[in-house]
Image (cartoon, rainbow, N blue to C red):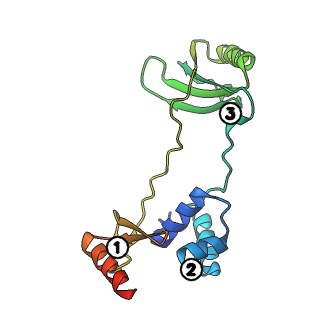
């Protein structure tokens, strides 16, 4: 399996797409000072190499109906559980009941029906209903990327990020950042 090396331009494109998957190639080109064909070919490369899996929409489930989130702990996993649409996540965890499932039901009636169905498949289960969501964030994938210093051109894995005219610039060290800022001031 080939490992795709992402440069700072790839990372910038990914960040823009992550913020708005509907952003146009033209807008990305404008923001990053690239040509549209360059943006298009880079995005195609990211798709073809599996870096971008899909472009998607995040729907606020609370806007759809009275959703109830359930957390279910079970001792064993029956394969039929994998086919239940309401179950959205399943984890193997430590503890007395080594399976933790997250499910979303359309209301209290559906939640009770789901719990009954799960009892048939797994027997010994514990169902807990979430009363309130105190924090919910999508975990950002850790991008293991090579960055090219925008001043000296060397490679770094932990860049110093400096935003200039709404464009992120990457630097390998404080000296390169300082020299870049000085060069920008002098060019005015």
Residue 127 in the image: above or below residue 79: above
SS assignment at label 2? loop
Question: Which residue is depicted at the point 74% across and 20% down?
Answer: 110
Residue 34: image tag:
2
Q: Earlier in the sequence, mark 2 or mark 3?
A: 2
Residue beneath disc 1: 155
Q: Which mark is residue 55?
A: none
3 or 1: tag closer to the N-terminus = 3
Nearest the viewer among 98 and 56 is 56
Can I make out residue 7 in this image?
no
What residue does disc 3 label? 62
**What residue lies at 57% left-to-right and 65% top-to-bottom?**
49
Q: What kind of element bears circle 1? A: strand
Residue extending furthest toward the bottom: 187
Badge 3 element: helix
**Which image quarter holds the C terminus?**
bottom left
Q: Quadrant of residue 156?
A: bottom left
* Neighbourhood count class around disc 3 (C-alpha, 10 Å): few under 14, some 14–19, many 20 upward: few
The nearer-to-camera label among 3 and 1 is 3
Verify CB contact (< 8 Å) between mark 2 and mark 3: no
Q: Nearer the viewer, residue 145 or 19?
A: 19
Label 1 CA crowd tier, 10 Å (few <14, some 14–19, many 20+): some
Between 142 and 167, the one lying in front of the other is 167
Residue 149 on image: x %, y %: 36, 75
Mark 1 or 2: the one toward you: 2
């Amino acid at each position: 399996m080939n490992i795709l090396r992402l440069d700072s331009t790839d990372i910038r494109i990914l960040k823009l797409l992550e913020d708005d998957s509907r952003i146009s190639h033209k807008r990305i080109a404008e923001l990053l000072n690239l040509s549209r064909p360059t943006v298009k070919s880079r995005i195609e490369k990211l798709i073809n190499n599996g870096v971008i899996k899909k472009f998607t929409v995040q729907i606020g489930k609370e806007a759809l109906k009275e959703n109830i989130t359930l957390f279910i702990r079970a001792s064993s996993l029956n394969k039929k559980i994998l086919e239940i649409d309401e179950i959205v996540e399943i984890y193997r965890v430590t503890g007395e009941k080594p399976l933790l499932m997250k499910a979303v039901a359309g209301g209290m009636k559906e939640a009770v029906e789901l719990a009954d169905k799960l009892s048939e498949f797994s027997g010994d289960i514990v169902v807990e209903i979430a009363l309130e969501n105190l924090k919910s964030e999508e975990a950002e994938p850790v991008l293991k990327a090579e960055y090219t210093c925008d001043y000296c051109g060397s490679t770094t894995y932990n860049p110093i990020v400096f935003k200039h005219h709404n464009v992120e610039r990457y630097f390998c060290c404080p000296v390169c950042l300082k020299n870049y800022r000085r060069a920008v001031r002098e060019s005015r």
